[in-house]
Image (spheres, rainbow, N blue to C red):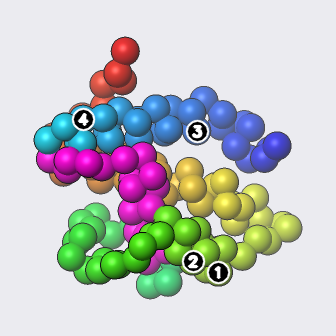
Amino acid sequence: MNRALDRDRRSSSQVWLDVVSAVDYLSRGHRPGLTVYDALEEALRWHIGALVAGYSEYPTEVDQNDLPWDDPDALRTALEQLALHNPPDADDEQSTSAHALHTALTHWVRQMSDQYNEGCTWAHPT
């Protein structure tokens, strides 16, 4: 168990629900064929880009054209890059992979909400 996320279990679960809701909506119109795995891969690419660029926060606008990956297994590559650019630090719970995934997905959900849902939260499918 990850103690940092244990304390924040509800918001971690909420982020995953928001991702599923966003993907459900976007895949029906704005981004046909989008899957949860595509969303995770895209979120990780943005997160890694921010790590490599040295941003303390994500840029407010993410230009998808600046991220040209033509990779047959882009999620694997993103996970490998996450491991490469986010080494664990025993003294820092913020450097865990779980925290990086949570941070990346949180940003992705916000970005998709701003771009495609007028900044509103996503309604969860029933």
Measuring from the top left, give residue 2's x and y in whole percent.
78, 47
Residue identifier under label 4:
25
Find the distance from the CA under tag 1 to the CA under tag 3.
Answer: 23 Å
Residue found farthest to the top: 126
Residue that mark 3 sits on: 12
Q: Quadrant of the C terminus?
A: top left
Q: Is residue 94 left or right of residue 78?
A: right
Q: Which residue is mark 1?
A: 84
Residue pictured at 74% horizontal, 47% vertical: 4
Which residue does the numbered mark 2 point to in the structure image? 81
Q: Quadrant of residue 113?
A: top left
How busy is the neighbourhood of tag 2: few (under 14 within 10 Å), some, or many (20 plus)?
A: some
- Quarter of the picture containing the N terminus is top right
Residue 80 in sight from this viewpoint: yes
- The amino acid type of the residue labelled 3 equals Ser
Q: Residue at x 30, y 49 (%)?
A: 34
